[in-house]
Amino acid sequence: MKSRKENVEPSKSSILILEDDESVGLALKEVLARAGHDVFLASRPDEANTVLSTHPNIEFLFCDCLLPQMTGLDFIKQARTNYPSSRFKVVLMSGIYTDKQFIQESTQSTQALAFLKKPFEMEQVLKIVKKDEAPKREESSARKLLYQMFANPTVTSRQKRKVIESIEEVSGFDLPFLYSLLVETKSSGYLNIYNADGSVSGISFCNGNIVGVDVDDKTTFLGEMLIQSGYATPKDVQAALRDKNNRRIGNYLIQNNQLSPHAFDLILMEQMNIRLVRTIVDQKIRVNFAAADVDMSNPSIDADTLSYYLHDWVASKISMNWLKSLYVMWSGNVIVKSPAFREDHPALSMSLVKSLDGFTVKLGNQMTLTQLLDVKGYNEIAVYKAIHFLLTKGLIVFAQRAAFANPQEQLKVLKKIWAELDGKNGYEVVAHMETGTGGGSLESTLKDFLTLIGEPPQDSSSEGYLIWNNIKKAAEDAVATAKDSNKIDQFRQATQKTEAEAKLRATSLMEEVKKSLQFNQYAKALESLTEVAKLNPQTQQMHLYSSWAKLGSMDPAKKQFIMKEVELELMQVPPDERYDTLFPFVIGLFNKAKGDVVAARKSFEKSVALDPSFIPARREISLLMAQNKKQDVFNVDLKQVVSGFFKKR
Amino acid sequence: MGKLDVKMNKAADKLTIQMAGTIDEDVDFSQFNLAGNQAIEVELSGLKSINSCGIREWIKWMGTAGGASVSFSHCPKVIVDQINMVDGFLPATGKVTSFYVPYYNDDSGSEKNVLFRYGTEFQEGSVTPPSSVKDEEGNEMEMDVIESKYFKFIKK
């Protein structure tokens, strides 16, 4: 296994040394190369020009002031004119020009980071590079560092704070990982979430427990939750809502012995879950964590309970598109078990992991995500989500990047990346690259992204080579476009318009789906739902209506397969969509299809309790009652017939 | 005593406020009247934390200061973070006169908060950190914040 340091080591800098003194040049090159940097050594200005023209990503130029063909200062001036897109930083060196005035003037005129008087300590050189690259590293690899936090068995408060601080913006989809990190590392303090609309939400942690969730949306769902959970009857809840007389509904029910305090705690925890779910959105947010002494309170969410919620959130809230973009950065990395992994960890027995046969064994086989996706019988959604769940729970991490095992594997990765980029405009390509790399400056995003596709395939006539070039060109073009603010604004507006239109179309199609289902036109509903999933995969209640349609149109010959599909659909229903009349209704249909008539009837009754005007649930109850009646008549008749044989005459 | 300790001292047209503790959902700023003052000075060195409910309450409370010029001194990191992140946290008539900057030494792990004062270590649009900060053992310390983010409010 790779060492911890290897696991979290970010990529290094490209450095050019222009030094005609061979011994100094070689020593400098060796020290910098040993520290992991890509180093080019030139002894003459023309050689240095060749390096600059072929390597636009040079970040540091160590330049001697006295060179064979010109002075170092002239070379720097010329290089900046000839290679305007190259943004190297300068470190001047000299053993001759060492007077204070020269140092001051030359440093100013070349905007050099430092002036090294020969002979100098090599430690000094490393410090200069380290200090200057630190902010860039923090910016460009922040997302990577965040998701590798569990590689470190003892994460300090400062490390957590630093990594959270270093991220300019995160996606709301990154929040489950942050919650898990703060819980698993026993944090106390406040995580404040700053939403794009200016509102602020906050999560309070006490020694690794979530003790408070504050969101702007104060919808309580209490009545619905009490009915759904079965802890209170619809009648009691309705009476409580009518008569509570300013008392809280929970207190009213407890005081009237209609609800136990323990059951109410469970409901309050579920309420916290729903509020947490409200923060997990596909939008950019900013976060800030401040360690503080926070009082413990009840109910609270501990690490074990959080596992269930994390599983649920990953299954139901996080979109596949987002996951695919995120995992581009890990596609070639071997998955390894983290220090927290243990074979009997409860998370390993949860549905996402369990649905993949032999998954935990494969995690110990040094496989990459790409290889796991290729395992026969593994569902793509389940693989991405199971991996994300285990990464979020801190049970796995990604080892340092391994080169592609073979050209075929690289081709697979390239094809996947190209499928995501093909047909996208510059704005969309940059957005995709930023999700995968964690953002930062455009240059660092491009650089990080290009490292993901590896070296160009050797065979220039191969399909891989062609796709590799397509990806590189699309990425470079997108970054060039993004630098043109007018053009990128046009693209941004076009994308936003397309997205808005797609959402509108999806919403109107959903209305058609609802109508079709009311009239039992399942095939028509399924057709529209396929379109909805393409237009806006985040459409509310899509998985519920899809399950309804699938259960309604079920071909008995394919029952097993469809039931599995519906199970996966139901797993993707977000918690905040479960307190509406539709959810228990669909669960009722699912139970009915399984043959569990008692459970089905209970679910339909809950559905009616939540909305007495919901006709499909009433219809199902009537159908079940009629069926039951038929059976009773038959049973009674049979009893009579049988008893008739033994009647005393 | 609650989680937040507030001391107010009114002299002529100037109100001086000293705050220490935590600003959270339990805070009741309505008892601390800001109205009717020309100048308000808020000293925050004892403030430990603020959560999202506290941020909302703070913004509402600051809104009651009217046109008074409000100066904030000894702002800890938690407050500087909110000033940088939340629009309206620093009222339109507000000004930071001093704030703390965390410093750190990688080798010894020592931490220290250094006070940056207006006119000495910073002014509008620029920051001039002390040339050297040392811990108790004489180790050189480095600034422990991302400067472009932490000093954003100065460059606004």
Image (cartoon, rainbow, N blue to C red):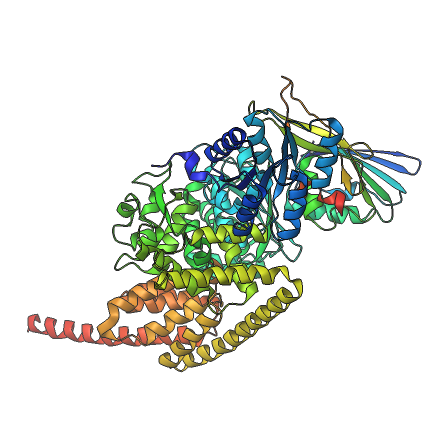
- Quadrant in which the N terminus of chain B appears: top right
Q: What is the total number of numbered labels drawn onto the structure image?
A: 0
* Among the 4 quarters of the image, the one containing residue A483: bottom right
Q: Specify whether residue A239 is in view.
A: no
Looking at the image, which residue sits at the far right?
Answer: B12
Residue B26 shown left or right of residue A504 in the figure: right
Residue A532 shown left or right of residue A79 in the figure: left
Q: Specify whether residue A624 is in view.
A: yes
Position in image of residue B73 (x %, y %): 78, 34
Position in image of residue A160 (x %, y %): 53, 37
Residue A45 shown left or right of residue B40 in the figure: left
Pick whichever, B61 or A472, lies toward us.
A472
Pick whichever, A501 or A209, lies toward us.
A501
* Among the 4 quarters of the image, the one containing residue A278: bottom right
Looking at the image, which residue sits at the far top?
Answer: B137
Residue A603 against residue A614 in the figure, above or below:
above
Residue A217 shown left or right of residue A574 in the figure: right
> For the point 50% across and 74% down, which residue is it?
A506
> For the point 44% across and 77% down, which residue is it?
A513
Position in image of residue A368 (x %, y %): 34, 49
Pick whichever, A290 or A466, lies toward us.
A466
Position in image of residue B50 (x %, y %): 66, 40
> For the point 69% across and 33% down, which residue is it?
B101
